[in-house]
Image (cartoon, rainbow, N blue to C red):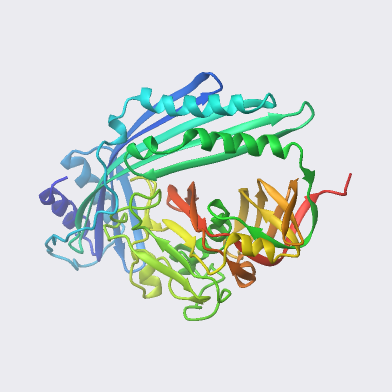
């Protein structure tokens, strides 16, 4: 959409007294390929094209969208939405301001232009490697998902910006069985990057680790529930912070008074060894973008520094309620969703210890090597997460493998009880669902130790 038409639509939207209007135009091509064993089970492609208009007046919002991209269709939507307001015109004119945007994500070839045969080759490597690992493997699944999203964002603050997002992700799972029980291994790798990143990725090692997790968990003892010191490994271990604390630091919750961290800026909310960051500027990372979905440059936002709450993640609408400046954190799944504050790449920063030191200093506890799914109440921070791979720690050493462990707790208590943080921070890749739909986000952390966590398990109950 050119600037002339964008300005016309925005001014039409403001003709009944709105104090802000924006248009979000999206053209997105998505693909999903699924391979099960030796078979290609599914290949799906979709093309989403349309625009959304949002009009604000103080804390009120009206929002609508259309895939009628003609000038008349867009003006019709603007007139329908503006009918929600009935007051004098506040903005009679404005000009777009050209501002340079730092390129955190760069691509040579977009995913939509890559042939499926290349993507299928990666999936074949995954499933064949998993199947060859052990006779106990009964199922191997691999998925390639990608989307190329081109957006134009224009608003009455003078913003007119375009961006391209090129998300690609490979995920794989293995199911192992000994004839009486079944266990699963899973992992994924992705980014907002060029497909050349996959050419440097070791899919064989990736698939073998998944198969190993499934097979070896078959031999594990059931976890005995209790209260333990828990060492949570890096990468996807950060899902606990993401779910139990990260969502509570989004203005989506804070502005409504539905967060346990409301009104606590400048206060101690975590242990001294905890620094947590949301950073949408990491080059070509899964959750990174050049601009957010309000056209603001993405930023590196320090949320917690040495245990002190420093900032929230803020969008424009909720920022008005909070008297806070937007932080480049506004995101949405597509033009069909009104935007709000969301995480990008959220992680606990590196500490001073090594993973080996943390294990060696733990007398008796649980080592949660990988995390699985779970649930959380964002208003209270109470969570329940399943552990994928786990081992007992005895006298500073990893001993027997256990299965069926569940971590139960409260986010605000957990981050206060972290007493050791390692120096091996890395990321895990997932899709985060919230008020503005499902978006790519990274979770991350180094290996950490949490004192006296409640761990659920069925061991000893049979």
So how many labels did they put on this image?
A: 0
Q: Could you tell me which residue is drawn at 37 percent across and 69 percent down?
A: 319
Residue 403 image position (x, y, % from top left): 74, 45
Q: Is residue 184 visible?
A: no
Q: Residue 24 location, x and y as percent?
A: 27, 49
Residue at (32% x, 60% y) in the render: 298
Where does the N terminus fall, quadrant-wise?
top left
Single out the residue that lies furthest toward the top: 39
Q: Position of residue 30 (x, y in %)?
A: 36, 34
Q: Residue at position x 39%, y 71% from top?
A: 321
Q: Using the image as rendered, state which of residue 254 and residue 240 is in the foreground.
A: 240
Q: In this orientation, does residue 313 appear?
A: yes
Relative to 133, say whether 14 is above or below: below
In depth, the one of 334 and 40 nearer the eye is 40
Q: Which residue is nearer to you in this view: 229 or 82?
A: 229
Left or right of residue 144: residue 353: right
Quadrant of residue 238 within the rendered picture: bottom right
> Is the C terminus in the top left, top right, bottom left or bottom right quadrant?
top right
Query: Residue at 61% of width from left, 34% of height from top?
Result: 211
Estimate the x, y position of residue 441 in percent, counting from the top left: 44, 51
């Amino acid at each position: 959409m050119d600037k002339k038409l964008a300005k016309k639509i925005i001014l039409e939207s403001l003709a009944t007294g709105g104090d802000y209007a924006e248009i979000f135009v999206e053209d997105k091509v998505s693909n999903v390929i699924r391979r099960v064993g030796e078979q290609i089970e599914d290949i799906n492609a979709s093309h989403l094209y349309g625009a959304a208009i949002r009009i604000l007046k103080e804390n009120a919002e009206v929002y609508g969208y259309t895939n009628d991209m003609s000038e008349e269709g867009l003006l019709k939507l603007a007139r329908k939405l503006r009918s929600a307001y009935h007051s004098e015109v506040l903005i009679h004119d404005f000009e777009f301001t050209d501002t340079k945007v730092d390129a955190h994500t760069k691509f040579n070839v977009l995913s939509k232009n890559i042939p499926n045969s290349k993507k299928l080759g990666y999936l074949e490597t995954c499933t064949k490697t998993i199947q060859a690992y052990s006779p106990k493997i009964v199922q191997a699944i691999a998925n390639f998902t990608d989307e190329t999203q081109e957006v134009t964002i224009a608003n009455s603050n003078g913003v007119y910006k375009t961006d391209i997002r090129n998300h690609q992700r490979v995920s794989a799972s293995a199911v192992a069985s000994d004839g009486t029980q079944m266990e699963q291994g899973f992992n994924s790798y992705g980014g907002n990057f060029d497909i050349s990143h996959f050419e440097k990725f070791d899919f064989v090692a990736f698939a073998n680790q998944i198969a190993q997790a499934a097979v070896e968990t078959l031999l594990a003892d059931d976890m005995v529930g209790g209260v333990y010191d828990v060492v949570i490994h890096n990468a996807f271990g950060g899902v606990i912070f993401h779910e139990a604390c990260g969502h509570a630091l989004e203005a989506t919750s804070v502005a409504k008074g539905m967060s346990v961290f409301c009104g606590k800026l400048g206060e101690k909310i975590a242990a001294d060894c905890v620094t947590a960051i949301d950073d949408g500027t990491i080059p070509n990372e899964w959750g990174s973008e050049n601009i957010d979905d309000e056209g603001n440059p993405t930023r590196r936002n320090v949320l917690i520094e040495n245990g002190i709450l420093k900032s929230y993640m803020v969008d424009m609408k909720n920022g008005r309620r909070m008297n806070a400046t937007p932080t480049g954190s506004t995101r949405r799944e597509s033009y069909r969703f009104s935007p709000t504050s969301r995480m990008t790449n959220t992680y606990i920063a590196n500490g001073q210890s090594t993973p080996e030191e943390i294990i060696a200093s733990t007398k008796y506890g649980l080592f949660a090597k990988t995390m699985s799914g779970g649930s959380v109440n964002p208003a209270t921070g109470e969570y329940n997460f399943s552990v994928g791979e786990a081992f007992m720690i005895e006298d500073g050493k990893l001993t027997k493998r256990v299965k069926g462990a569940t971590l139960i707790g409260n986010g605000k208590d957990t981050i206060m009880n972290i007493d050791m943080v390692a120096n091996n921070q890395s990321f895990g890749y997932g899709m985060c669902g919230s008020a503005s739909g499902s978006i790519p986000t990274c979770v991350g952390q180094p290996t950490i130790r949490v004192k006296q966590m409640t761990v659920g398990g069925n061991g000893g109950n049979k």
